[in-house]
Amino acid sequence: MKHQKTNVERREFLGLSAALLGTAALGIGGCASPFSKKSANTASLGDKEGIVITDQAGRTTTFKEAPKRICTCIIPLPSIFFAVMGEDNPLIVGCNPASLPVYKRGTLEAMYPSLAQANTDWCARDFNVNIEALLALKPDVVFQWTFMPESIKKMEDAGLKVIALKYGTVDDLKTWITVLSTLMQKKERGTKLLSYFDKEISRVSERIATLPKSEWPVALHVTNSLKVMGKGFTSYLMDQSGAIDPTRDMGERQVSVNMEQVMQWNPQFIFVGNFNPIKASDFYNNTFPGQDWSHIPAVQNKHVYRFPVGGFPWDPPCVESPLTVKWLAHLMHPELFKDMNMRAEVSQFYKDIYNYYLTEEQITKLLDHTQD
């Protein structure tokens, strides 16, 4: 049964790889792994033992010093690694080729130009590794998904150190920050990122708590015209920003629905994911064959928005998730957040977290949620 479950999870993340290239939808959520019953999510630094990392597969690896050459099969990792380091650096010498299209779409390319030099020939988009090509890069550590145990074993058999991670929840995101900041001897930086994350989320959620749920709008996160996000991170975003997520109890991460179901939900807001080609105008112009969105309040009131792309797309978990929550709350509760200037919020976040000063043009592009 474990082997079967691993294959299912691997297929879901293959969807992520293809989606980042604009060819498929993303199904993200908390991912179990064959190791999920083991303890995980800890990292420590000891004077005698070196840097000790316990990854999300419950495996412990020790390093004498912070790695100087890093390879990652994991597509979202470069954006979080950059945030932990706080500056451009040449340490990632190899990454998944699917990391680069999204890197070029948002702000990360301008902030992290060194990543463009990372080798991509050693790793396939489906996370499988060419061991010979990987060894030629001489990595001090390789990051791989927890649901790829065979790949991890091959790399370790070749003498490489591997850290296994999983993805899909706020807790996973925070674990990545803890693991990376400990590994790179940036623990102070990691503590700052985690504290900032919680503080900025609270700025929104504390106001939302003053609203009765009867005033929360129904919001739908679509990954295609009739595919919606089910259980997972979307529910967290909607809870924090004050919206009813009608798909939160659905068992799957991505759920196919029909127009009848959408009409029953009657969403006042529709948020389009970044991992598909559809646009807000497709809903407004009713361009989907055999579907009539014209009676849906979100469409009638022009409340269809695409999630922005910053250092990483804002719909899955990322360092910029506090901005995602602010953006959602500002759109859905304009009166409650009328004093919140999203341009200023984005600008300040980038200064505080990335030590990067966005231009007005970059802010405009980032917040262009129509992307038509």
Image (tube, rainbow, N blue to C red):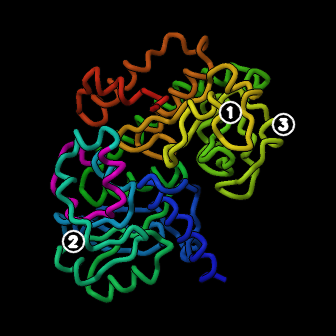
- Residue at image position (22%, 53%) is 115
Instruction: Name the residue nearer the viewer: 4 or 284.
Output: 284
Residue segment shown in magenta: 85-104
- The picture places residue 131, in percent across and down from the top left corner, at 28, 82
Which residue has dot 2 on it? 140
Label at residue 219: 1
Residue picked out by circle 3: 264
Q: Position of residue 198 (x, y in %)?
A: 48, 36
| 141 relative to 40 in the view: left or right | left
First reached walking from the N terminus: tag 3 or tag 1: 1
Residue at coordinates 23% horizontally, 84% vertically from top-left?
A: 132
> Which quadrant of the figure has residue 9?
bottom right
Near mark 2 (Cα within 10 A), the count class, few <14, some 14-19 or many ≥20, is some
Question: Does the magenta run of residues contain 156?
Answer: no
Q: What's under tag 1, amino acid-wise?
A: Ala
The percent position of residue 94, horizontal first and vertical second, equals: 24, 65
What kind of residue is marked 2? Asp
Q: Secondary structure at mark 3?
A: helix
Quarter of the figure with the N terminus: bottom right
Question: Residue visible at 43% across and 62% down?
Answer: 42
**In terms of sequence position, does the residue under pointer 1 or pointer 2 come before the other?**
2
- Alpha carbon distance from label 1 to label 2: 44 Å
Horizontal side, residue 164 vs residue 293: left or right: left
Side of 155 relative to 284 (left or right): left
